[in-house]
Amino acid sequence: MAPKQLHVAIVASPGIGHLLPVLLLGNRLVTHHNLRVTVLSVITTDTSSAVYDLLTSFTTNTTLSVIRIPAANISSIVHPDAKVVTRLCVMMRETIPAIRESIWSMDSHPHVLIADIFSNESWVIAEELGIPKYAFVTGSAWFTALFAYSPVLDKQVVGQYVDLDEALEIPGCKSVRPEDVVDPMLYRDDETYGVYLAQAIDVTLADGMLINTWEDLEPQSLDALRNNPILRSVVKHKPVYTVGPISKPYEPTVLKNEVIEWLDKQPKRSVIYVSFGSGGTISVEQMNELMFGLEMSRQRFVWVVRPPSGKGSDSSFFKGGQPSGPDGPCGYLSEGFLARTVKVGLVVPSWAPQPEILNHPSVAGFLTHCGWNSTLESITSGVPMIAWPLYAEQKLNATMLAEELKVAVRPEVLPTKKVVGREEVARMVTDLVEGENGKAMKVKVMRLKEDAEKAISENGSSYISICKFIEDCLSQIQ
Ligand code: UDP
């Protein structure tokens, strides 16, 4: 018999880039589709105050149930210097018993389990309960296609992907330039490559995939995932649902914030917002060039800074949003910069209210690391971008934004390969804020914003896709 109210459990791995879309998806299922949703959020000892604030705001302001699950201690299993992907996967695997206990002790068991792609192993719990299991991909459909097809590429490609002369063909999709592959594919002998391939195989074991995108944004990749015979067999003919854009809605607030108050005083469409997501870091040398480039551009800016790192561009992943170190926000910026730019710039340590900033009328552009959430937030705010990818699948996102959607400019060389010089920074910033190219990109991004609003409105493509997902769940549990 069909349940009176479908109860969905969603498992979220640590990291705001996964947790935020899980909470937003859960909230949408509750408010627009009348489901009961329980989010199981895995928390590490490094979890930042920003994540705690986020969890509290969802627990207080929505009817979502949120359960915090302390991550297993993996210090004796994984070296502390192991890459983020490896640590995340091992941590999630070791935390399965705690997730299981939490699910089994619920007053009524969920009817469906959804897991983000780092939480795939929790499907074993769905199997024990005899309930359907779904993957929630918090990236694009193009990324999903590359991800699912990676085990096939692994057999076809000889040597390192990055050494290839030709682009990688993904059936039915735009091909992927070797330098744009996701980080774990960069070096096949690296520990993360095997972890990534195992995840890619696991994702196709789900009963279906929910992707944070919408039909008009990625028609080609979505069509390939559903209809291309090769790709369809790779994803084992499982349904693909579009649920996006799941990006944090702008909520006008009377509670003022220092950044918003500063933006209120700036002319309309005059400010460039610079931020590398929840965990992105850049080198000392790059920070210097970016700093002088912003100054040389003579444009207004808000820059969310965190200490530079020589350890890799995702080295703040687990600590994203943590306050700055003892030197304060400016200890690592060159002397005099803050004084010289005091009239045009605002430097914010570590964390800022991004959706509110992007929706502010004074913001003209976003210099972004192209995390998928930041990308969608910029599009849904109608803000063109400077694409500055750092890690994960961000190079793929940058290529889509700059070459396909034409709503971003980007440096001539990949920032992960070479330091972007101050002249180029200044040129890109000025072009975005004042140039003809900036105006053309603004027109294009406004069109995407309208498409996005249509997709999630009642009877829009993503709304209908979620209804279909619910229908398919119900048909499996009757
Ligand atoms: N974010 C924020 N303030 C910051 C930095 C990041 O609110 O100062 C939010 C941002 O709005 C986005 C998320 O953190 O929703 C980052 O996700 P994304 O996928 O862009 O990048 P990741 O941090 O996962 O690399």
Image (cartoon, rainbow, N blue to C red):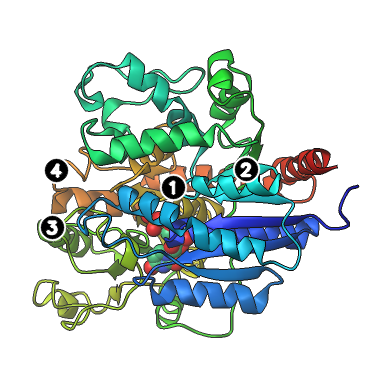
Residue that carries the numbered disc 4 in the rendered image: 418
Residue mark closest to the camera, 2 vs 1: 2
Q: Quadrant of residue 366?
A: bottom left
Residue 77, label in figure? none
Residue located at (63% from left, 35% from top): 215
Residue mark closest to the camera, 3 vs 4: 3
Quadrant housing the C terminus: top right
Q: Are marks 1 and 4 in contact (CB under 8 Å)?
A: no
Q: Are marks 3 and 1 in contact (CB under 8 Å)?
A: no
Residue 246 versus residue 133 in the image, above or below? below
Q: Residues within 10 Å of mark 4 (few under 14, many from 20)?
A: few
Residue type, label 2:
Tyr
Q: Quadrant of residue 65?
A: bottom right
Residue mark closest to the camera, 3 vs 1: 3
Q: Is mark 1 within 8 Å of ligand 1?
A: no
Residue type, label 3:
Gly
Across and down, in percent, residue 169 comes to 40, 17
Residue that carries the numbered disc 1 in the rendered image: 439
Across and down, in percent, residue 52 comes to 47, 76
